[in-house]
Amino acid sequence: MQLFSYSNNFYSNIEVMVYSNGYEDCEPGHFYGPALRKSYMIHHIVKGKGIFKLHEKTYHLSKGDAFLIRPGETVYYEADHENPWSYEWIGMQGAKIDSYLQRTSFAYYPIIHYSKNDRFSLIYAKMEHAYSSNASARDLLMNSVLYELLHFLVIHFPNKRIEKSHRTEEYVDQVIHYCLQNLDKKIKVTDISDYLGLNRSYLTRLFKQQVGSSLKDYILFIKMEEAKKMLKETSLSIQVIARSVGFDDPLYFSRIFHQKEGQTARKYRICHQKKTIIQAD
């Protein structure tokens, strides 16, 4: 029996972490359970056959299948006696794991199957490689692979039962987050649609319906709001502020600012810094 296994003893991670990972060539009839696991685990079968039991249901699985174990669920799984399976697994913990998995078909069914190419198995190989990396950065690399796995599942096995309104709210939240994280860059609508994996026209229509303004106008709005905040609260030059909100040309920034606010950035600063001083007095 070939067995590779890694386990992390930290149980109280705040967001996402790799709890364990490994690979096993099982002997005929090798089994686990009935028992509970302490973490979420996704086993991916690379060859052979076996069974997985959950909630009084038995699933007959083979190469390309993967099954999810949730903390606190009683599970049993067993390798076939004639063609025993080999599987790889990743165990994960964290406050956001469940919400991420709710975006996938694992939210309502514990089994998935992927045989299009070797991308799924490659993620597990990356995890094993990450474990063998420099100890000072091992956890960072392993968690980056975990995020890659979660992203893969959301893209290839989306939760099709999520209500449309809830999905729309999530898209809007992601748009806002993207804009706030990239205020110092030129943000194009196509940048955001590519980031979310959505059609540009669909995204702009969805955003308009949900927020009430066009996505292009919203991008400019939050840039101007950040610029106004910096004008009021810092002594940074107009040129620095312009670059800090994604404008390479300070003159163009000044022209846009004047159009939106009805006064120059310099006058805005003088007026609002005076107000701040008076209020402080």
Image (cartoon, rainbow, N blue to C red):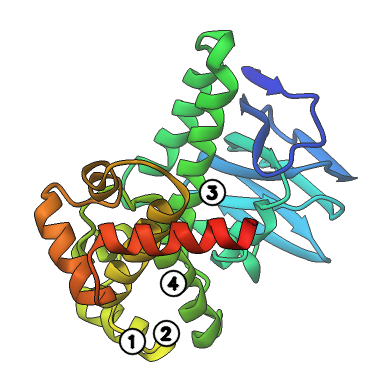
Identity of the residue drawn at 75% across and 33% down: 30
Q: Earlier in the sequence, mark 3 or mark 1?
A: 3
Q: Earlier in the sequence, mark 2 or mark 3?
A: 3
Real-space Cα distance between discs 4 and 3?
36 Å
Residue shown at 78%/60% (left/top)? 54
Q: Which mark is on residue 208?
A: 1
Q: Residue 202 is drawn in which quadrant?
A: bottom left
Q: Report which residue position mark 2 lands on.
A: 211
Mark 4 lies on a secondary structure that is: helix
Q: What separation in Å lies between label 1 and label 4 (alpha carbons)?
A: 12 Å
Give the label on residue 171, or none: 4
Q: Which amino acid does label 1 sit on?
A: Lys
Residue 26, image quadrant: top right
Q: Mark 3 points at which residue?
A: 62
Label 2 close to label 1 by CB (< 8 Å): yes
Query: Dot 1, crowdedness within 10 Å: few (<14), some or many (≥20)?
Result: some
Residue 261 location in percent, x, y?
28, 74
Quadrant for the N terminus in the image:
top right
